[in-house]
Image (cartoon, rainbow, N blue to C red):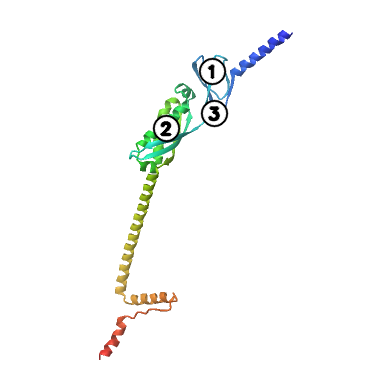
Amino acid sequence: MDLTATYLGIVVLFVIFILANAIRILREYERGVVFRLGRLIGAKGPGLILLIPIVDRMVKVSLRTVVLDVPTQDVITKDNVSLKVNAVVYFRVIHAAKAIVEVEHYLDATSQLSQTTLRSVLGQSMLDEILAERDKLNAQLQKIIDHQTEPWGIKVSNVEIKHVDLPIEMQRAMAKQAEAERERRAKIIHAEGEFQASQKLSEAAKVIADEPIALQLRFLQTLTEVASEKNSTTIFPVPIDLLTPFLGKDKK
């Protein structure tokens, strides 16, 4: 009896071992690339997967979007400016079998490709383009990386340049340039204001020349403004024309 129970226990353990190695459950975002005696069978899943123990081997692949942080790269731009630039790459596996068969460690391969492409593209660009046309460079990077990873069954959906670190000397030079630009605009605006004011004064002078009474009204308005300041002394200019009759009488 004891021997029979021992054999039965061994059989049960063997069956459990077989089932444990034959049954796989994959989530909705997972696929299993199955190899049978080293030959590719295909990608299976999601759900319950049955494998032949010892004969079949399965490699699990995630189909979710991967956010790959590209390490900071030293870049020399086309106008010989040294920069430190990092970026982020968004990609996902489209064909699980290709991602396993066509390339070894597709995550590392995509990371290395992203780093070299980032240095190459930014090295062919001017500093002003990197700072002002980042969307254009992002699209160019995405197109190049996606084209090279397509044989691996990987789709690159987006590439974003995160940070551009300028040298201190370049930051100071750009600050001086921006300050000079603001001063130039201020002088232009001031000159335009003076020009417009001179035009208005010229028009006003023509009106006063045609209507002498306008000058008297302006004179009275100026006196009203001076009186409103509560000054202790008020200068009251008298036109020479008002004194001319009196001066003529003294001569007689």
Q: Which mark is residue 115?
A: 2
User: The N terminus lies in which quarter of the figure?
Assistant: top right
Q: Is residue 244 above or below residue 77?
A: below
| SS under mark 3 | loop
Kindly indicate whether the residue at mark 3 contacts the one at mark 1 (C-beta within 8 angstroms): no
User: In front: 205, or 224?
Assistant: 224
Could you say where residue 154 lies in the image, as x and y percent from the top left?
Answer: 46, 28
Q: Is residue 191 left or right of residue 149?
A: left
> Which residue is labeled 1 in the image?
57
**Residue in view at x 40 percent, y 28 percent:** 148
Report the amino acid beneath label 2: Gln
Callout 1, which amino acid? Arg
**Crowd class of label 3 (few under 14; some 14 to 19; many from 20; radius 10 Å):** few
* Rendered image quadrant of residue 135: top left
Q: Nearer the viewer, residue 54 or 155?
A: 54
Q: Is residue 153 above or below residue 238?
A: above
